[in-house]
Image: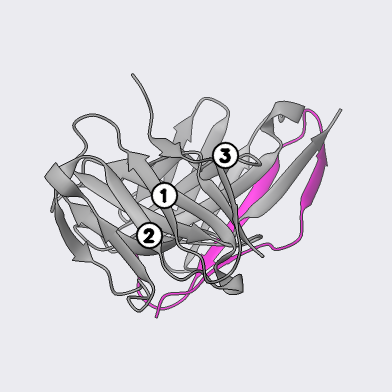
């Protein structure tokens, strides 16, 4: 079965720096991969989607890369702010009606 | 536009008692999901509905869990009887899933269940 690995340790960075979070998967290559943000006591919120035939996707300060050879996605937040502090979840799917499988998430803390 | 609504937000019960959670998805979303999220883990799918039909309930512990989505809109998830290990956050999500598309899901705030 598919396994997703995200850094279990929290990532602590200084405000203004670029945060980089990693999502590694085993087994099959997904049709697409998504990143969600989750704040304490709230449900996940969709941020970005990248398809298997795409290398990179950007949205404002966010950037996602997808390397199907390495079986890895990187999620970047540039010019990070304390308000970016949250847990970031990686999720992937084979597409169509196949379910989304979520990683455990990485907690990001941006310090002023 | 209103998001996914869930109630209650918190529930504390004694073990062996029944409990029910309610979800109202985003208007027009045909697909509804119930997830379980343990502390420090990602959401795990319990059941997925396409309109009123349960199309994936392989991860639902059917001896004690049940769900329904009458009329293809609201849904309820029930546990009877609850066990200590059921303590978790129960998330509801909805989407406009199609066979050829991608599945961007919109989550509710969740119900935090504590079983004593």
Number of the front mark, 1 or 3? 1
| Element assignment for label 1 | strand
Q: Give me the disc on residue B78.
A: 2
Pointer 3 indicates a residue of which chain?
A: A
What is the CA distance from the residue labelled 1 to the residue labelled 2? 6 Å
Q: Give me the disc on residue A42.
A: 3
Do tag 1 and tag 2 residues touch (Cβ < 8 Å)? yes
**Marks 1 & 2 on one chain:** yes
**Marks 3 & 2 on one chain:** no
Q: Which residue is mark 1?
A: B21
Horizontal side of B114 relative to B44 (left or right) equals right
Instruction: Look at the picture and state if B58 lies above or below A78.
Output: below
Q: Start and end of the magenta stretch?
A: A1-30
User: Where residue B84 sits in the image (x, y, percent)?
Assistant: 61, 72
Pointer 2 indicates a residue of which chain?
A: B
Q: In terms of depth relative to the viewer, which is nearer, B39 or A72?
A: B39
- Residue A4 is a magenta residue: yes
- The answer to which image quadrant residue B87 occupies is bottom right
Q: In terms of depth relative to the viewer, which is nearer, B52 or B93?
A: B52
- Residue A29 is a magenta residue: yes
User: Where residue B16 sits in the image (x, y, percent)?
Assistant: 52, 71
- Give the residue displayed 20% in from the left and 59% down from the top: A97
């Amino acid at each position: 079965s598919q396994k997703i690995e995200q850094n279990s340790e929290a990532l602590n960075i200084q405000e203004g720096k670029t945060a980089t979070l990693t999502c590694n998967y085993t087994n099959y290559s997904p049709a697409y991969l998504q990143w969600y943000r989750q704040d304490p006591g709230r449900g996940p919120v969709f941020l970005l989607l990248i398809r298997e035939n795409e290398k990179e996707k950007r949205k404002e300060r966010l950037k996602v890369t997808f390397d199907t050879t390495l079986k890895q996605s990187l999620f970047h937040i540039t010019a990070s702010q304390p308000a970016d502090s949250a847990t970031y979840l990686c999720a992937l799917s084979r597409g169509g009606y196949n379910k989304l499988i979520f990683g455990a998430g990485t907690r990001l803390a941006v310090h002023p | 536009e209103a998001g996914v609504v869930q109630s209650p937000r918190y529930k504390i019960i004694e073990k062996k008692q029944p409990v029910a959670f309610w979800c109202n998805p985003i208007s027009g979303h045909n697909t509804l999901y119930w997830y379980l999220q343990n502390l420090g883990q990602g959401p795990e799918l319990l059941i997925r509905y396409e309109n009123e039909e349960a199309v994936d309930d392989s991860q639902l512990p059917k001896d004690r869990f049940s769900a329904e989505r009458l009329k293809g809109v609201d849904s309820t998830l029930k546990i009877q009887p609850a066990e200590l290990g059921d303590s978790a956050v129960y998330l509801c999500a909805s989407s406009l899933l199609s066979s050829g598309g991608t599945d961007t899901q919109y989550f509710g705030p969740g119900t935090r269940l504590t079983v004593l």
